[in-house]
Image (cartoon, rainbow, N blue to C red):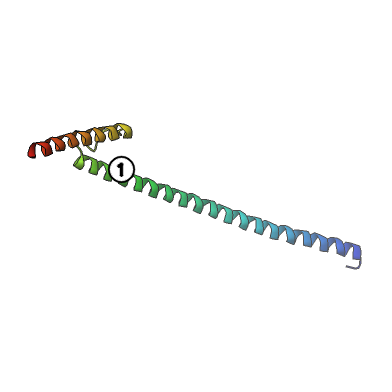
Amino acid sequence: MSNPLLQAFFVGRAVAEVVNDRLEVALTDALSELGKFDAEAREQLRQFTDEVLERANRAAEAANVGQSTTGTGTRSATTDPVDLQAMIDELRAEIALLRTELQKYRSNSI
């Protein structure tokens, strides 16, 4: 190549092709890493959700087992969810009943 202008054109074109190839590889690698990160994040979120649900189910089962063994015999583990305020009110009523019975017993034994 005797013409420097023609040589500069081909060098510029070769530089553009090499830069384009390297940018393509870099972009492909970046998108691949982003895809891996997204997949890993989704998997971790799924595992986290499964673990939370598993622990919640175990706690609910433990509460139902405790409720059916320590309750008054009218509730079972298969009943619908109980209103907490109603349960508290029932327990308070039972405590009040037991207190009155205990006071009667103490007054009769004196």
Q: Is residue 81 above or below residue 49?
A: above
- Outermost residue on the bottom side: it is 2
Residue 45 showing in the rendered view? yes
Which residue is rendered at x = 32% and y = 35% of the image? Answer: 84
- Outermost residue on the left side: it is 109
Relative depth, front residue between 59 and 73: 73
Which residue position holds label 1? Answer: 60
Relative depth, front residue between 89 and 4: 89
The local crowd at label 1, few if under 14, some if 14 to 19, many if 20 or more residues have their Cα within 10 Å, is: few
Q: Is residue 9 left or right of residue 92?
A: right
Residue 103 in picture, x, y percent from top left? 15, 37
Q: Is residue 56 left or right of residue 107?
A: right
Relative depth, front residue between 54 and 63: 63
Which residue is rendered at x = 68% and y = 56% of the image? Answer: 24
Which residue is rendered at x = 24% and y = 40% of the image? Answer: 67
Which residue is rendered at x = 88% and y = 62% of the image? Answer: 6
